[in-house]
Amino acid sequence: MPGADDCWTDHKLLISRLNFKTQRPPRRTPDSIPHRRFDCDKLRNPQLAQNFREACERHLVDPVDQASVEDHWTTLRDAMTRSAEETIGFVSKKNQDWFDENDGTISLLIEAKRQTRLILENQPTAENKRTHKQAVADCQRGIREVQNTWWQRKAADIQNYADQRDLRRFYAATKEVFGPTRSSGRGWSHNHNRQRGHSITMEVSF
């Protein structure tokens, strides 16, 4: 097959024999369950910070005179938790990915190639074959351009943080892209993607 998107069950029937082995999922203890983290970076926004303070004041009730320290702490904790859920929410995603952020553009490129493939299947002429071949080349070139543009923009942002000696944002931006990895040398950040089978090396000068 030229590509996975060129295989459609409407035109080509496929028969596959699979053997599945079901396993019971491992039992998760309370300590192994990941905790959801609030998106505290949103509190840098003055409006969201004000909304959070107002929500805390709204959820806080007047303490009882005979209440213990534990009761006061539980009231404060519950009020701050409900306020955070209403205003800032939880962190949804840690690592950034060029494919997910450009899903709309990539979908249009693949859909254009798929349409030419369907036309070629229904009318296998020399003109339609050339059109489909050109659409395949355009799709591959467009996806490469999207990927290169995304990486160049991220590299420029990281280099800008390094030039400003802003190590906090530098490491935060590197972690968003690559995730936590071991350092392979001074001024270098290296990540090996085993699933995609390629290695990415970024050089940053300080």
Image (spheres, rainbow, N blue to C red):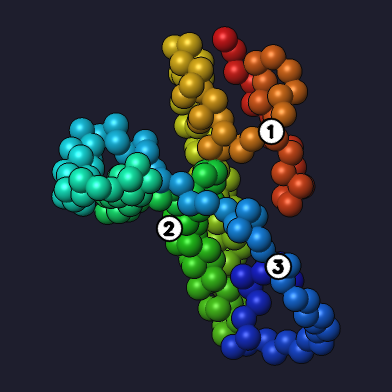
Residue that carries the numbered disc 3 in the rendered image: 27
Question: Up-down: is 76 above or below 124?
Answer: above
Q: Do the residues labelled 3 and 2 touch (CB within 8 Å)?
A: no
Q: Which amino acid does label 2 sit on?
A: Gly
Question: Residue 115: x and y, percent?
Answer: 50, 73
| Mark 3 residue crowding within 10 angstroms, few (<14) / some (14–19) / many (20+) | few
Under tag 3, what secondary structure? loop
Tell me: 206 left or right of 40: right
User: For the residues carrying marks 3 and 2, which lies nearer the camera in this image?
Assistant: 3
Return the x and y of residue 177 as percentages of the image width and height.
56, 37
Decide which of 84, 117 is in the foreground and name it.
84
Report if residue 126 is visible in the image: no
- The residue shown at (44%, 12%) is 164
Residue at the disc numbered 1: 181
Q: Which residue is drawn at 67% across and 63% down?
A: 28
* Residue 74 in the image, given as x and y percentages of width and height: 35, 49
Q: What whole-number distance in Å separates the C-alpha atoms at marks 1 and 3?
A: 28 Å
Question: Furthest residue to the front?
Answer: 66
Q: Nearer the viewer, mark 1 or mark 3?
A: 3
SS class of the residue under badge 2? helix
Q: Where is residue 154 in the image (x, y as percent from the top left)?
A: 50, 32
Above/below status of 57 relative to 203: below
Q: Taking 167 as reference, is 103 above or below it?
A: below
Label 3 is placed on what type of residue?
Arg
Query: What distance separates the C-alpha of mark 3 from that of mark 2?
Result: 38 Å
Closer to the camera, 134 or 164?
164
Q: How far apart are marks 1 and 2 (CA)?
A: 30 Å
Hey, what amino acid is under mark 1? Thr
How crowded is the residue under tag 2: few (<14 C-alpha within 10 Å), some, or many (20+)? Answer: few
